[in-house]
Image: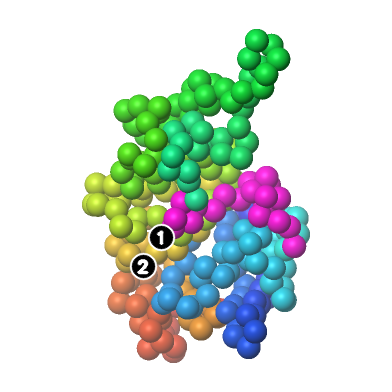
Amino acid sequence: MSDPILSAAGISKFFGGLTAVDNVDFEIYPGEVVALLGDNGAGKSTLIKCIAGVYRPEQGRVFFKGEDITHHTPADVRNRGIETIYQDLALAENLDVGANVFLGKEKTRRLFGLIPVTDDMLMREEAAGVLDELDIHIPSLKQKLVNMSGGQRQAVAIARAMYWNAQLVIMDEPTAALGVPEQRKVLALIRQLRENDIPVILISHTMHDVMAVADRMVVMRRGRIVANIPRAEATEELIVRHIVGSAENGENAVMA
């Protein structure tokens, strides 16, 4: 097997007297979709925020492509190829598709050769190219995101990650509050990322989604990893038992 593209070793994160993440080891390999599962408060979001640079762990190290990124800022982490798509998407609803793909990295041109202005046409053209590659169809790239469906917004967030050459995508509840057709589209996009050899960390409470796309299921409870289950051995019942803590001696899981 190839080396992991991301490796978190001995990660611990405290908030006052609360231990949110407790000595966690976590790895993901190229082209792998790993579901990170657990109840609310299990430590999932805190762990990915330690990976994404939002939080700095008190203990442990995070390595990406062999480089220690433990204390890098979120911008540094993004520049190295880790894109995190949070549940709220962090998109600007009052802007169009192109402006959102280039949010914070806007393309400009000079009006009359002198005055710098945003190059909206170029940004839409570039956005259209990556949307075509992902087989995403949005009728008009000029429309603002506030007028788009939840699935279309997710697609824009994924397109932004792809345009900036994401080498690892972290997705936090990507199908929450979406209708069934839009859920299917997001799952298809996850599969496409995998086909492009881009690994995905998927946080989800929807077992159907997890079983449909994940290669491996990592279950957290009370800040610790309690199970690491290959897809071939996973069942919804087994996963739920680990989430609620009734499978501590289960033989079908590799205990972390």
Question: Measured from the top left, where is residue 216 in percent x and y?
Answer: 45, 64
Residue under numbered circle 1: 173
What is the residue that sits farthest to the top in this orientation?
112
Counting residues from the start of the chain, the first of labels 2 and 1 encountered is: 1
What residue range appears in magenta?
71-89
Q: Residue at x 40, y 46 (%)?
A: 154
Question: Measured from the top left, where is residue 40 in percent x and y?
Answer: 43, 76
Say which quadrant the C terminus sits in. bottom right
Figure quadrant of residue 166: top right
Residue type at mark 2?
His
Question: Measured from the top left, where is residue 211 in percent x and y?
Answer: 34, 62
* Residue 1 vertical placement versus 165 (above, below): below
Judge whether residue 116 can be spotted in this image: yes
Residue under numbered circle 2: 205
What is the residue that sits farthest to the left in this orientation?
180
Secondary structure at numbered mark 1? loop
In-image side of 114 versus 210 (left or right): right
